[in-house]
Amino acid sequence: MTSRRETPARRRAAIAGLGLTELGKVYGPSARQFAAQAVRRAAADAGIGLSDIDGLLVSAGTTPGVDLSLQVDLGLRDLRLFTQMQAFGSTAGAMVQYAAMAVEAGMADTVACVFADAPLQQGKATGAAYGGRRTTPTGWGSLLGSSGFAGPNSFYALAARRHMKTYGTTSEQLGAIAVAQRAWAAKNPLAQLRDPITLADHQASRFIAEPFHLLDCCLVSNGGAAVIVTSAERAATMAQPAVQVLGWGQAHPGNSFRRNDNLGLVSGAAQSGPAAMEMAGVTVDDIDVAEIYDCYTFTALLTLEDYGFCGKGEGGEFVATPGMLGPDGKLAVNTGGGQLSSYYLWGMTPLSEAIIQARGQGGERQVPKHDTVLVSGNGGILDHHSTLVLGTEG
Amino acid sequence: MTVRINPVARDEESAAFFDGAAVGEFRLLRRRSTGEYLDPRTVPDPDDDLEWTAAAGTGTVVSWSVVHKRARDGGEPERVVVGIVELAEGPWWWCRLDADPDADLWQLPVRAVFVPSGPEPDHEKVPVFAPAEEADHAR
């Protein structure tokens, strides 16, 4: 593992720009257009021109078109680093990691990392956003759907149920996460859902796939997000407070779902989290703000456990402890409302809020102490994990 | 049988499995050299010595979820029980459960029953797992 001490501070990677398009039920632009807009906005945010970009990492959600065509859409010439990446919800964190390595190795100076998706269509129900693809009901690929499974909702529900039965985690404890994040979202002008909710609202919301209620599940959003990664030295000359990339890690446990494994009990976060914190020279006690991937309430709970904020199996009790989560809580988690309440841009949701908080630009929701920020990414069915430690002190 | 499975047709990779299902056998792959049981969906290495074998068709519930399918007419949603079964031979199988949606199914012993997935000749029988006692009673 790279020791931060061996990398001269001026060459250490930093995030110098953040670009967000309009987010949520935004109709008209294609995902490809959102991607280009996000990169332009990120460059403008950093105070640089598009021609300063010499590296580009592209990542698509469910909508086609976000691919290598982006270079020509943006008119970028003579890139030194350019590829499309896919590790589902862990991609955003992973893009920053590869960009940081490229910058520190001198392969590229200024790398844009972008994600965009546009699954929502005007006039169609949110629930239909990911359901439009019909496969021929043939062979292995058709068995789950034909048997009644309903995609990630049911897969994550199985993972959550196993945790609940193994450790005694309850639906009300999961609800504590949803309620706390909505309270944060109420202070976030970027958030799609800002009306406060109670635990009773969570319990009364309709079931999607038991044990998950509607309010256990993330939003669906259209939009794009991009970040600019460069050296700390260069970032210091740009328009925004530099956010240093202090540590990183990935973990891909390889759970097959075909034999007993850690599904629902332990995720890759248990490996990538400690690795990223060790690289940054910090522990969970040093984390001021945690932006945790929350495609479901349960994902956030499991990740907090795996990162070591509480013991294994104690996540339910931990998140439901009065005064732990939420805007006045002891632990600042998902301060923008997360994917449950703000917007759903895969790993860009926690990453973007982490950058906003680290810079001190969170407005009404700004956390007073924000020197060390932990970011998680999660993809597949708890299959892929990326962790970043960001900071404002080198 | 009350559960309804949507139509599934075979392809080359799944043919041997559905041949088994048609005659009431839950088939797994087994590595001849070691006796290890493998998921029927395992993509074989050409160097592997795999053979199809009939499993016991029994197991226990590892986890379950009740999926709520909204009714088109706005009425009560259909509640569909799905789950993961650890087969007696070791592999996990994700499947429909023919079980009470309000029951605690944790570690429940279950047995495979084979349900036609549709009326057409190419609509295969699909294994559904039901509480072992009830399934035994129905045999």
Image: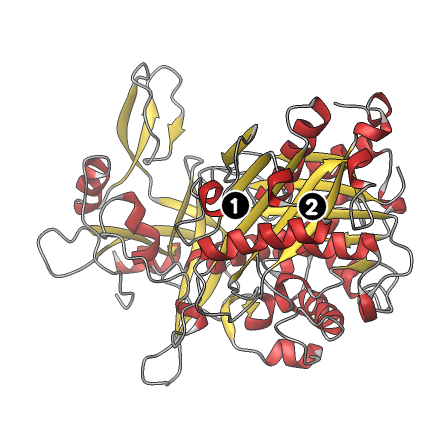
Crowding at dot 2, Cα within 10 Å, few <14 / some 14-19 / many 20+, comes out as some
**Who is closer to the viewer here, A85 or A209?**
A85
In this view, A102 is above or below B10: above
Secondary structure beneath dot 2 equals loop
Of the residues shown, which amino acid type is indicated by label 1? Phe
Query: In this picture, is A290 found above or below A245?
Result: below
Apparent side of residue A312 relative to residue B91 in the rendered image (left or right): right
Q: Which of A190/B98 is in front? A: A190
Give coordinates of residue A118: x percent, y percent: 46, 60
Quarter of the rendering containing residue A109:
top right
Q: Can residue A204 be seen in this view?
A: yes
Q: Where is residue B64 in the image (x, y as percent from the top left)?
A: 48, 58
Residue at the spot 52% in from the left edge and 42% down from the top edge: A58
Please tell me which residue is depicted at 65% across the width and 70% down the height of the picture: A191
Q: Earlier in the sequence, mark 1 or mark 2?
A: 2
User: Which mark is on residue A48?
Assistant: 2
Residue at image location 86% in from the left, 65% down from the top: A329
The reply, left or right, for residue A257 in relation to residue A106 is left
The residue marked by circle 1 belongs to what chain?
A
Q: Specify whether B24 is left or right of A68.
A: left
Q: Residue at x 65, y 28 (%)?
A: A102
Residue at the disc numbered 1? A88
Q: Does residue A37 sit above or below B2 in this rendering?
A: above
What chain letter is assigned to the residue under label 2? A
Residue A238 position in % (x across, y down): 78, 45
Counting the numbered discs, the total is 2
Disc 1 from disc 2: Cα separation: 29 Å
Residue A318 in the image: x percent, y percent?
80, 58
